[in-house]
Image: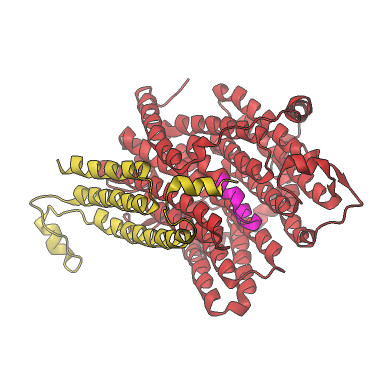
Chain colours: A yellow, B red
């Protein structure tokens, strides 16, 4: 069920990217998509009825047996940071573009910059 | 030659245990130096040159040392790096192309920002060539995306910003799909290693290959590439086209070699890409767009024969960067106008040597690379790849048959071109010695016939034709929409390949 919701989020973001005309809306759609992706990693790692592994006390963790998988969350942290910085960069670019193209409609921009 | 390399390899054996340490230091160097350039702007060129020379030395050591190694940092869930014969060619390409670009820019008044970005790009490309697990590769590819964006847009004109934004949209969306694919691989195998692809569901393969093929400009997903590469400044396009796109191609090749089940997919992508790219390149009238389309087609050649991908990538990297630098010095970008007025002889000479190599004429490295690739093709690929080779000859005839004369004074860029060309074209001549068995009568005859056929077609048909291919598929929405189609196509392909035991006849 959670998985279905996660994929719905990813797809919503993707369709937003295609269908929205405004550049800022496109960037927001991309953010929705990346939220979906991040949620998928969290969903994969989440397991009920298990303990959290603690690096400070590995013996006790191993002795208790079943522990949740920390790897996907650790990995996705990097992706969150990267996604956030790329979005910041894109927004700066859009701000610069807005001087010449106040509407920020993709079609109009593409038409004016076609070689 | 081989006695010498063996002696060198023996002399380097004691170094083998330091390989992980050296490698990590070498990966970290461009990033630390790159940011130091901001602090010491007066030494920007020297610092950049130093990093590139260290890279060249490292690549040479890896090629001579012949010690393929894979090692894991921070345990089995950490970063996996692989140094092997295949990757070493790519690393050498990166080092020499960056060196040539720096030489070309040496006497221009480029800001320190430019050198910082070039070195960061160089470093991220290096790390992408080394990574052997999906997550480190993701990080390397994203860093590289940001560095390329900043290089494309560093002139800050509104047009270049739009081109850069378009690139970020496309590549970031593709990388999100790639991340979902990586999560599927992890769920199936509990690891991020490339080998895990064998036990993963087909949708994981489809999503990961979608991400890589967009990033690497492969098949229809690569249609973002011509506009980006042709709008950037010449030195930047030389780096983007020469090495940066190969960062996504190498992982595809690695996957194909590690996981035999996906090899047919990679080979098929290679054939499709080679034909699509060359189809556009033949009819293109703009020199830089033609070169960019041709990059797409050459990546197809690299993918079509995964085993020998390294050598082909090396020769293509040299040729493409040389031609982009030359195209930047030509008086016009339109071939029609170029055909009306002669160009300086030195420029023509540079372009012709590079074009002869990529067309596969003997005595240059392109001949050996093409022969080697053609030999490693599967039977079902041969016809298509030969058609693509003829198409290559046709598109580069546009450069070779440009009118030229001694009386035209060369533009001032030519002086800057000389050192860069010495590195790139000299590299082509030296690399020619890497595969001597290519020089048999049959191979030479075949290469010459291919080129002759291409030139005849060029003079008989293409030169008089003026066909404008639609540019609709290059719109942003279409590029994004194509991704979903590509994903479905790759998914069906993966299901088909797996149900047939990994062999497409």
Is residue B294 positioned above or below B425 on the image?
A: above
The residue lying furthest to the left in this view is: A49
**Picture residue at 65% right of the left edge, 52% below the top:** B6
Please tell me which residue lies in front, B246 or A36: A36
A13 vs A112, left or right, is left
- The residue segment tinted magenta is B227-239
Occupied quadrant, residue B115: bottom right
- Position in image of residue B133 (x %, y %): 39, 50
Magenta segment, principal secondary structure?
A: helix
- Position in image of residue B226 (x %, y %): 57, 44
The residue lying furthest to the top in this view is: B505
B78 vs B67, left or right, is left
**Picture residue at 53% right of the left edge, 79% below the top:** B39
B397 vs B142, left or right, is right
Is residue B402 positioned above or below B378 on the image?
A: below
The residue lying furthest to the right in this view is: B407
Is residue B15 positioned above or below B193 on the image?
A: below
- Position in image of residue B258 (x %, y %): 44, 39
């Amino acid at each position: 069920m959670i998985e279905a919701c996660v994929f719905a989020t990813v797809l919503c973001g993707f369709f937003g990217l295609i269908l929205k005309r405004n550049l800022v809306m496109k960037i927001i759609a991309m953010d929705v998509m990346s939220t979906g992706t991040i949620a998928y990693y969290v969903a994969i790692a989440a397991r009920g009825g298990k303990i959290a592994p603690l690096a400070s006390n590995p013996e006790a963790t191993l002795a208790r047996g079943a522990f949740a998988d920390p790897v996907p969350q650790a990995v996705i942290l990097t992706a969150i940071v990267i996604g956030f910085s790329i979005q910041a960069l894109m927004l700066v670019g859009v701000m610069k573009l807005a001087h010449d193209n106040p509407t920020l409609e993709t079609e109009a921009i593409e038409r004016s910059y076609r070689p | 030659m081989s006695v010498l390399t063996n002696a060198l390899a023996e002399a380097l054996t004691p170094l083998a245990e330091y390989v992980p340490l050296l490698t990590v230091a070498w990966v970290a160097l461009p990033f630390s130096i790159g940011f130091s350039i901001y602090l010491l702007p007066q030494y920007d060129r020297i610092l950049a040159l130093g990093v590139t020379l260290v890279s060249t030395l490292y690549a040479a050591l890896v090629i001579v040392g012949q010690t393929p190694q894979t090692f894991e940092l921070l345990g089995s869930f950490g970063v996996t790096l692989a140094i092997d014969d295949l990757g070493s060619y790519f690393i050498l390409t990166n080092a020499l192309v960056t060196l040539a670009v720096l030489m070309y820019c040496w006497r221009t008044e480029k800001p320190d920002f430019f050198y910082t970005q070039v070195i960061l790009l160089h470093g991220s490309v290096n790390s992408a060539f080394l990574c052997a697990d999906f997550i480190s590769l993701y990080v390397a590819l994203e860093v590289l995306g940001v560095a390329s964006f900043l290089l494309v847009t560093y002139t800050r004109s509104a047009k270049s910003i739009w081109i850069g934004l378009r690139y970020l949209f496309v590549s970031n969306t593709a990388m999100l799909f790639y991340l979902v694919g990586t999560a599927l691989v992890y769920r199936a195998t509990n690891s991020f290693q490339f080998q895990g692809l064998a036990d993963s569901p087909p949708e994981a393969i489809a999503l990961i290959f979608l991400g890589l093929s967009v990033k690497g400009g492969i098949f229809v997903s690569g249609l973002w590439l011509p506009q980006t590469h042709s709008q950037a400044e010449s030195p930047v396009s030389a780096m983007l086209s020469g090495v940066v796109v190969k960062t996504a191609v190498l992982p595809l090749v690695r996957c194909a070699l590690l996981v035999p089940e996906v090899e047919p997919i990679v080979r098929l992508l290679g054939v499709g890409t080679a034909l699509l790219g060359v189809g556009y390149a033949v009819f293109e009238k703009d020199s830089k767009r033609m070169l960019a389309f041709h990059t797409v087609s050459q990546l197809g050649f690299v993918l079509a024969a995964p085993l020998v991908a390294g050598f082909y990538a090396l020769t293509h990297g040299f040729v493409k960067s040389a031609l982009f630098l030359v195209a930047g010095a030509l008086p016009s970008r339109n071939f029609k106008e170029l055909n009306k007025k002669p160009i300086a002889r030195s420029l023509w000479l540079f372009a012709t040597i590079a074009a002869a190599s990529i067309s596969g004429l003997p005595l240059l490295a392109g001949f050996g690379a093409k022969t080697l690739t053609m030999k490693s093709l599967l039977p079902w690929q041969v016809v298509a790849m030969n058609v693509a080779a003829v198409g290559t000859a046709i598109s580069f005839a546009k450069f070779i048959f440009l009118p030229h004369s001694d009386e035209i004074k060369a533009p001032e860029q030519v002086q800057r071109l000389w050192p860069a060309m010495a590195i790139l074209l000299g590299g082509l001549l030296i690399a020619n010695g890497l595969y001597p068995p290519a020089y048999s009568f049959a191979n030479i005859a075949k290469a010459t016939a291919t080129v002759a056929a291409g030139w005849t077609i060029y003079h008989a048909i293409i030169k008089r034709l003026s066909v404008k291919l639609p540019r609709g598929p290059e719109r942003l929405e279409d590029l994004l929409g194509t991704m979903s189609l590509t994903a479905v196509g790759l998914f069906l392909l993966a299901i088909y390949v797996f149900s047939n035991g990994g062999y497409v006849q």
